[in-house]
Amino acid sequence: MKKSLLALALMGAFSSAAFAQSSVVIYGTLDAGINKTTNTANSAVLEGARDNNKLGFRGVEDLGNGLKALFHLEIRFEPDTGNIERVTRPLFQGQSRVGLQGGFGTVRLGRALTALQETSTQFEPWSGMPNVAGFQTDLMVAGYRSAVTGSGSDPLGTAGNSGNRFGNALWYNTPVINGFQLNVNVGSKENTGLATAIVGRGTVAAPQYPAGSLAQAYPYSVSATYMAPGTTPKYAVYAGTERNATEVKWHSIGAYYRPMPALKLMGSYGKQDLSHIRAINDSMKAWVLGANYTVGVGLVRFGYGQRDTDGEVKTKELSVGYEHNISPRTYIYLDLSQKKVPVAATPLSADMNQNHYALGIHHNF
């Protein structure tokens, strides 16, 4: 009898927990392959060649009256060693957010991609994957990522941290109203201090942002989107702007269009304003055109783009990729890319080719 009562009590406790927590999903990506990029330190290596390798947890709890609590945690790691991504990055490098969702929209707190960068990945031919053949990191965001120049969303972050996220930040997404949505993201001034000095408008002896200095301005990121109705929108557009803690600004617009279900055409333009930290050569512009085309169980990715930085010859990139689905969750891929980049010692007068080759396998779980 006592055993039966104990079993009933345990069942009641677990059933209450199950009702309180509507759902928790464990997901991830494993991406490994062989890749090589000429004229760089990257010899042929076996590692994550195309996408971030990640382990994630996300959950939603129904609080009643249309209100939900939600959380999202994402770990990044290196598949060839099992180490945390780049060793020095946070445990939850991908994101760590908690928030509430209801008729008012969604409010979240924590660390993640900025509002504009979350939006722009949908308009890039490699879907924002941070590989060499893609365009999101180097061209679509106009090279907006360097702690040395003071660009990047988080230039005052710790050494090794990624520069395209806000930490100690708040996100707000409005409900989608007739296809329109506004996304707003504000970071705090809380920071561990700049790891590497930014000379900016100062001198090497007296940099504008000395090592250890804290944020000077509240960073923010805003994007607005419109998507045509339907589960697979025929077209979509976006516009947005972002300012980081050193008051470097990035503005971007883009669109995509599906003339047929199998074909997605896309384009984007971005401009970076470095005038707060540079007296000359204070502008950086970039544009990208791309296409995704589904052929049977395969997908072809194509893109071409340019980045024009004041004081440098243009960076030009042409990329093509193919992925072949061998199951609903697994595909093998081949990426080929050629990029003309300025020679570091003579940015005004010379460039060189960097050829990239990658062959790998990608698995989602």
Image (cartoon, rainbow, N blue to C red):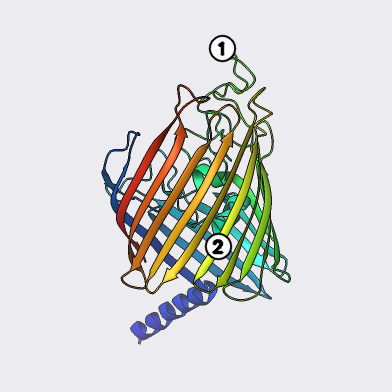
Q: Nearer the viewer, residue 174 or 335?
A: 335
Q: Mark 2: few, some, or many residues within 10 Å (few <14, many ≥20)?
A: many
Judge whether residue 38 can be spotted in this image: yes
Q: Residue at x 57, y 69 (%)?
A: 258
Q: Mark on residue 205?
A: 1
Q: Nearer the viewer, residue 90 or 3?
A: 90
Quadrant in which the C terminus appears: bottom left
Above or below, 158 against 119 in this view is: above
Q: Mark on residue 162?
A: none
Type of the residue with mark 2:
Leu
Quadrant in which the N terminus appears: bottom left
Task: Spot the residue most to the front.
Answer: 349
Could you say where residue 158 lies in the image, as x and y percent from the top left? 50, 34
Q: Earlier in the sequence, mark 1 or mark 2?
A: 1
Q: Nearer the viewer, residue 80 or 249?
A: 249
Q: In which image quadrant can residue 37 be found?
A: top left
Q: Residue at x 69, y 34 (%)?
A: 217
> Which residue is under mark 2?
265
**Mark 2: which secondary structure?**
strand
Q: Nearer the viewer, residue 90 or 314?
A: 314
